[in-house]
Each structure stands twice: as C-alpha cells, then as structure tokens.
Image (tube, rainbow, N blue to C red):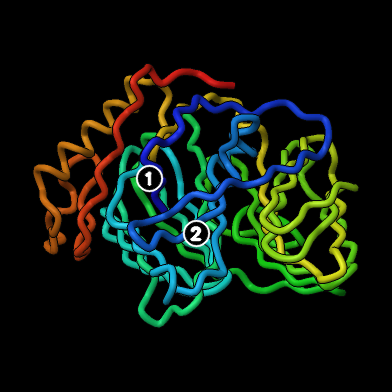
Amino acid sequence: MSNEEARPDELVCAGAEATAVEIMTPREVPLGGLRAMPVRRTLPQRQRSLIGAWCFLDHYGPDPVAETGGMSVAPHPHTGLQTVSWLFEGEIEHRDSAGHHAMVRPGEVNLMTAGRGISHSEVSTATTTTLHGAQLWVALPDAARDTDPGFEHYAPSELAGEGWRGRVFLGSLLGDTSPVATFTPLLGAEVVLEPGVILPLEVDPSFEHGVLVDRGSVTVDGVTAKPAELAYVPPGDGTLAVVAGDEGARVLVLGGPPFGESIVMWWNFVGRTHEEVVGFREEWQAQIVREGAVVPDASQVDDGRFGIVAGDRLRPIPAPELPNARLRERR
C-alpha cells in the first residue's frame, strides 16, 4: 500500500519510552483518487512511531467496493522496509517488480521485502464486494536494509481454545510459530474472542506490543481499547491479559523488541538521512519519466533501483513534493 497523502509527514522516527498501557487513536487518510477509500492510520504518530520494528499501520473497512471503488493503488516504490498484508474480507491482486504475482486473501499473509528498492501495485479483484483488512510496514535494520527484494506467502492454520480462535502469521504465539522470515524478531497474529473471554497471552517480556481492535472492544492489562484503537504495551511483562467486551472482539496482536535505531520515513521510503530519502525520490521520478506507464515485458523488470511492475496497466504514482525544509529529526 502506498502513502497517498499529498503532504506526507517528514519523520525521523524513534520509539518513545512508556511505563503503562497507552491507547492510540487513528486518523483517517483517503487512499486513492476521486472515490478515495478511507483508511485509519494508527502508526506512525507524533508521540509514538514504532512498536518494535512495526512502523506503519493502516486499518480499513469493511468498505462496500461498489461505493468506494475498492483498492486501486498503482505502481509505487519502497525502500528499507517490508510490507505485511492481512485481510479479513475481500481479495487483492499484488504485482511487484521482482516478478511476484499473488493474491492477498483472508487469513493468509503476504510479506514483501523492499530492501534496497522495489515497486508494486495492489488492486482489489472484480469479485470483491467488501474490502476489510490491514496493511503494515516493518522497518529493516541498518544491516539488512540494502538486501535483495523478496516475497513470501503463508497461510497459517487456525488455532482454537475455549472461547477463542487465532492465526499466527509472524513470530510465535499461542503455541504456534510462523515460518516467515523477518530481519528482526517480530510478532503478528489475529485473535478472535467470544464475549467476556479472558485470554492470558504468553509473550516475550523483551518485546513491546500493540493490540489493534478490529471489532468489539478489549481490555488489555486493565485498559480498554475500542474499535480502531491500538493499545500499546511496553516491555517488561511475559503475559498480556486480554479480556473481550460484551460483543466479543477481533484483534491483531503485534510485537517486537524496541527497534533501537532511528529512521527517516517519508512517503513510501524508509532511510536514515535527509539526503538518502531525497535521492530515492529523485531516482523514482527519473525512472517513471524514462519508462512511461505501461511495460508488459517482464524482461525489463530490472531497470533502475525500483524495477518495473510487469503486466500492470496503471500509471505509476509520482512522488509528492518534498517539504520546503530539511527532513529533520522528530523524537
């Protein structure tokens, strides 16, 4: 997913310290053109930009595609991150410049590694009537951010217990471990709770965690989070006490050790300095001017840092204008 804001925030991001559960509320951002699909953006925020290596979280739907137009995100670039796509309803077609063509479906994770540079597109399929899910980004550590682009697909088995169901798509939880490779330790799981269920989740005490409420409400370590809110839990405890409200709940549980590195994140780029991000933008702009909109020949996918999304018929998304100031550190 692309950051579609005309004036995206310019951030050097670093996690803030916390000693108790924080409730983070999202802001609404339009995704797309004339019939923009609204998304709820919970990360980054000015007071907290990372949870572990998780640095971006868009939560959307359930959206009636006939009214919103669904998702139609043309080819756009990424650097220094991994994208994680998770759906509750609908279907999205993914194409990228490393030659991967896959579908995103409910209960199945697609993880794309941008590394030194990739471009991709995401379009909801013609059979999709309702679109509902989350798009997340993971910042790559400095030692891995120039790695080769890549892609993994994984369909985790459903786990179940008394009053709950779950799927673990990254890391380990509920006695299950995902085989999907990441460059820092991470946790990503969907958990569905029946009304009033108390579920103590055994977690790594060195991790910080985020619990995103998709539907219903939950109390996390004594603090209540409502739909679309994200409960942040600092490191230190090996158990997350999650209690479902009267209507039950569906949540995403995210986690990872504090990232330990500052990052410059602007538009779809994660870098380390102002100059680096400016350079990424210039390379993307030069590439889309040079290559034009339609490149159906897969033999051309290696052109430029970001490659070309073979077979895609949408015009690539130009980068927005940079702010009239140096991209600066904000902690």
In the rendered image, is residue 269 in sight? Answer: no
Does 297 sit left or right of 159 as displayed? left
In the rendered image, is residue 256 in sight? Answer: yes
Q: Quadrant of the C terminus?
A: top right
Residue 35 drawn at (x, y percent): 38, 63
Residue type (three-letter) at the residue carrying disc 1: Ala
Q: Are marks 2 and 1 in contact (CB under 8 Å)?
A: no
Q: Nearer the viewer, residue 132 or 264?
A: 132
Q: Nearer the viewer, residue 143 or 263?
A: 263
| Residue at the image position 72 percent from the left and 39 percent from the top | 207
Does 12 sit left or right of 311 as displayed? right
| Residue at the image position 42 percent from the left and 76 percent from the top | 66
Distance CA(mark 2)–CA(mark 1): 14 Å
Residue underneath mark 1: 114
Local SS, label 2: strand
| Residue at the image position 71 percent from the left and 60 percent from the top | 251
Q: Earlier in the sequence, mark 2 or mark 1?
A: 2
Residue 321 drawn at (x, y percent): 29, 32
Q: Quadrant of residue 145?
A: top left
Residue count near mark 2 (Cα–Cα under 10 Å), binned few <14, some 14–19, many ≥20: many
Q: Nearer the viewer, residue 317 or 103?
A: 317
| Residue 214 versus residue 284 in the image, above or below | below
